Amino acid sequence: MAETLPFDTTELFIAGRWRAAEGGATLPLANPSDGTELARIARGRAADVDAAVAAAQAAREGDWGRLTAAERGRLLGALGRLVLEHADLLARLEALDVGKPLRQGRADALALARYLEFYGGAADKLHGQTIPYLAGYSALTLREPHGVTGHIVPWNYPMQIIGRSVGAALAMGNACVLKPAEEACLSALAFARLAQQAGLPDGALNLVTGLGEEAGAALAAHPGVQHLSFTGSVATGRLVQAAAARNTIPVTLELGGKSPQIVFADADLDAALPHLINGGIQNAGQTCSAASRLLVEQPVYDALRERLAERYRALRVGPALADLDLGPLISARQHAIVSRYLEMARGAGLRIVAQGRVVEEAPAGGWYVPPTLVEGAGPMHALSQEEVFGPLQVLIPFDGEAEALRIANGTPFGLVAGVWTRDGDRQWRMARGLRCGQVFVNNYGAGGGIELPFGGVGQSGHGREKGFEALYGFSTLKTVAFRHG
């Protein structure tokens, strides 16, 4: 049965007004659970991006730019409360659009509300500094917004990434142009409607849907944008950074990873087990920080492998609204990519330790892949090096800390790592030795980590979002020196 959506999905939001794209073109939006057309979205292009950037510039020079930090914070707080009031609707939209189980969609809606609460409360807490200087001088620094910020948001966690990037940018007083992924736009469109309802001045937030190579490329290259935030693939991130370089503007890039969880023989395996699995299969493994490599110390390798296999065999995959352990992959393209990696594992003679199952009632047109646990791929195998972006985890044995660090650091990525050990000295040695942006010790993910700065090194990108650190990224520093007399 076709879904009835609560608003017109074929419009852009520019200067506080909902309107069709220039020329009126639209694009299909698919339902990953059954492969049918869920809705149509506006096909924004360069002219629409021009209009959105102009609206953002006018907002910076107008009502939005005149607000105090406290007033901006109150508006973000009001928006966060509206998100909470509409959490069930947002969760359903995210489930339909992205394919994630309903409860994961709801967790994303609650995270979006928390981001807005956090950044609303932080808006008037970011201070400059006074600097001891020459006699007869006073010197100080000010934190100021960049101006117009562009936000290119991926399809896997639209609400969370809107919260961590747009929320922080608005808190600093920037005016935003948001370009959601063409595969998943519904929660972004709903968010813009809630922002309008919360009373954000016209042009403070603008939203242009469309193709990455059209609307996304136009936003990345726009000379009226002063900062870009991009989350997505390494290949597209390079294009975004190159486009931004031509305008000499800063870019925050979060590009993915091949994140390890490292289990030592003295670890609390009962505590680790659910984190080891959920870290790899959440959102069907379509997570930049997915724990796609499980490094296990030899003395406990066999025992932990059997316990992981038992859990894996109980996992169920089905339609998003069925709210099972996993939903479908986002698209036929992603399904083909993940299926190719599974065939690679079989073709290379790797052992499939265990798989979950796709339930019988899953529609034939949906893009389902069973979660799969593999062993036998060495640290340099493609399955251990490349980001699959699907529910596939690789088990890798190791002997001692030195080998664990060598394997963990032995990919081009460096986003997140987990360490499981009771040894306090080892915890610190591993945390210091791991080459990545976040290390979780005896946990993985820390409850969503809204307050924790997030980003990577190497091909995982650069810059930080989430936490208070994001406010520095979405602002620029001005130094003022006064001479007295």
Image (cartoon, rainbow, N blue to C red):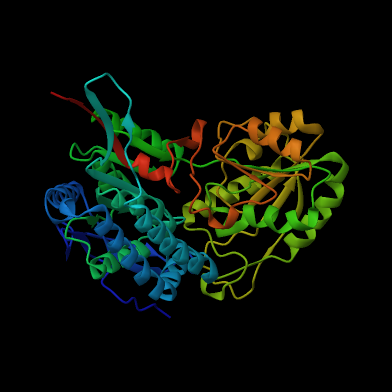
Residue 249 in view here: yes
Q: Where, quadrant-wise, is the C terminus in this rendering?
A: top left
* Viewer-closest of 455 and 186: 455
Residue at point 65% right, 30% down?
433
Residue sitting at the far bottom: 1
State left or right for residue 45 relative to residue 464. Answer: left
State left or right for residue 20 relative to residue 93. Answer: left
Q: Position of residue 323 (x, y in %)?
A: 57, 72
Q: Position of residue 80 (x, y in %)?
A: 37, 66
Asked where in the image residue 92 lies, by quadrant, the reply is bottom left
Residue at point 64% right, 74% down?
360
In the rendered view, tell whether residue 70 sits above or below residue 240: below
* Viewer-closest of 249 and 412: 249
Q: Position of residue 28 (x, y in %)?
A: 33, 62
Residue at point 86% right, 48% down?
302
* Viewer-closest of 277 and 265: 265
In the rendered view, tell whether residue 349 sits above or below residue 74: above
State left or right for residue 225 relative to residue 449. Answer: left
Residue 86 in view here: no
State left or right for residue 142 relative to residue 2. Answer: left
Asked where in the image residue 301 lies, by quadrant, the reply is top right
Count of marks placed on residues: 0
Q: Position of residue 319 (x, y in %)?
A: 54, 71
Q: Where, quadrant-wise, is the N terminus in this rendering?
A: bottom left
Residue at point 32% right, 34% down?
250
